[in-house]
Amino acid sequence: MPSCKSRTPEPLDILRQFRRIFSAVKQNTRNFEDSGRISGAQWWALSIVARHPGLRVSELAAAMAVHQSTTSNLVERLAELALVERQRATEDQRVVRLFPTPAGQRIVDQDPQPSDGVLPDALKRISPEQLATLHDILGLLIADLTPFATTPDHGRHC
């Protein structure tokens, strides 16, 4: 990864970096969705279910770092498309487990997307030390923005 150490970056330089990150993620999602099958978020959920058959909705929400209601909506749509099957656990009928259907498994197997999405995939390639630094700095930024946030942060913090 190239480094520009010749000058101290300005806040607008960092803002440009955020914009490039979000633009790349958005473009990747748009390219995927243009294929006409399912949305990028639906594919991500489907790929997690395919890798972990029998997952509960709450576990899928945790794996995606999104609210459980968001995950429930994704699962509902995937079930309507016959890509995910919901099965009630025999030991406790309140527990619903998720399984890919053969059609859902084929979509995951045939698509070259990183299984966790392009941004999580890129973050996995950063060294643990750099990731810790990024986490700490972003935590400071989030704390400064918290009074302006419209939705709660469901992430985990130290």
Image (cartoon, rainbow, N blue to C red):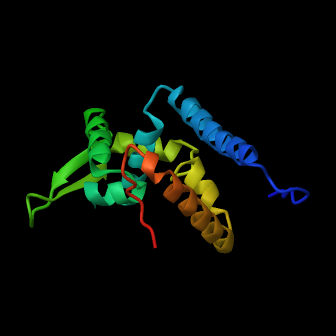
Residue 52 in sight from this viewpoint = yes
Residue 148: quarter of image:
top left
**Placement of the N terminus among the 4 image quadrants:** bottom right
Residues 98 and 7: in front is 7
Whether 21 is drawn above or below 60: the answer is above
Left or right: residue 91 compared with residue 133? left
Total numbered labels placed on residues in the image: 0
Q: Residue at x 68, y 68 (%)?
A: 130
Q: Residue at x 21, y 48 (%)?
A: 86
Q: Position of residue 24 (x, y in %)?
A: 65, 39
Q: Position of residue 124 (x, y in %)?
A: 61, 62
Left or right: residue 127 compared with residue 91? right
Q: Position of residue 91 (x, y in %)?
A: 9, 67
Whether 109 is drawn above or below 121: the answer is above
Residues 8 and 55: in front is 8
Q: Residue at x 37, y 42 (%)?
A: 104
Residues 145 and 121: in front is 145
Q: Residue at x 31, y 47 (%)?
A: 71
Whether 1 is drawn above or below 70: the answer is below
Whether 66 is drawn above or below 127: the answer is above
Q: Position of residue 57 (x, y in %)?
A: 27, 54
Residue 92: quarter of image:
bottom left
Residue 56 in sight from this viewpoint = no
Residue extending farthest right: 6
